[in-house]
Image: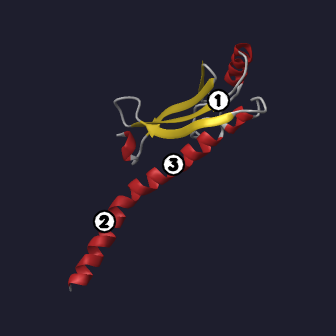
Amino acid sequence: MIKKVALILTVAVVIVLSPFWVAILVNDVRLWNFSRQLSKVESLLPEYYVVMAEGSDIYNESNGNHCSYRATKVYRIIAMQETLDSLKTEIEKLVFMPAKKSDRSYPAEVNVDVVGFLLIVFITDGPYDAGFDTRCW
């Protein structure tokens, strides 16, 4: 009897929580695809560079139930300042697709910073409706 009740409770919990898990999984796949676009940057870089850091996240940038996507890569490039500045200009011209297919047709926002020998590239997109993704509530 106890096993049957435990099984029913487990199934009920899974059914109730599955919309949340599915929404989080779908947004994670979108984030992964969105962040992979940063590989376009590497085709513009000189032969010798090192990826110092990279990361991506889903976050809530406002007070509402909205998800935004952000991906970042930090490159260490030993080059003259003029080269880094021209790289910055070229990277800012790249077009990155939005994280989510929707009515909006504009590309993701690109920000590039040069700090010493570091080239920091951010792409951001959003906000989109959070749905059941609790990270954006």
Q: Earlier in the sequence, mark 1 or mark 2?
A: 2
Quadrant of image for the N terminus: bottom left
Q: Which mark is residue 76?
A: 1
The amino acid sitting under disc 2 is Val
The amino acid sitting under disc 3 is Asp
Identity of the residue drawn at 41% across and 30% down: 61
Asked which secondary structure carries label 1, the reply is strand
**Cα distance between the residues tagged 2 and 3:** 22 Å
The amino acid sitting under disc 1 is Arg
Q: Position of residue 54 (x, y in %)?
A: 57, 38
Q: Residue 58, relative to residue 123: is it above or below?
A: below
Identity of the residue drawn at 79% across and 33% down: 47
Residue 75 sits in quarter: top right
Q: Position of residue 68 (x, y in %)?
A: 47, 35
Q: Position of residue 5 (x, y in %)?
A: 23, 79
Residue occupying the far top of the picture: 82
Identity of the residue drawn at 66% across and 38% down: 37
Quadrant of image for the C terminus: top left
Label 3 neighbour load within 10 Å: few <14, some 14-19, many 20+: some
Q: Residue 111, relative to residue 42: is it above or below?
A: above
Label 2 neighbour load within 10 Å: few <14, some 14-19, many 20+: few
Residue occupying the far left of the picture: 2
Q: Please state which of the two labelled residues, at mark 2 or mark 3, is closer to the viewer.
A: 3
Q: Which mark is residue 28?
A: 3
Q: Residue 101, relative to residue 63: is it above or below?
A: below
Q: Which residue is label 2 attached to?
A: 13
Q: Position of residue 7 (x, y in %)?
A: 29, 77
Q: Please state which of the two labelled residues, at mark 1 or mark 2, is closer to the viewer.
A: 1
Q: Are marks 1 and 2 in contact (CB under 8 Å)?
A: no
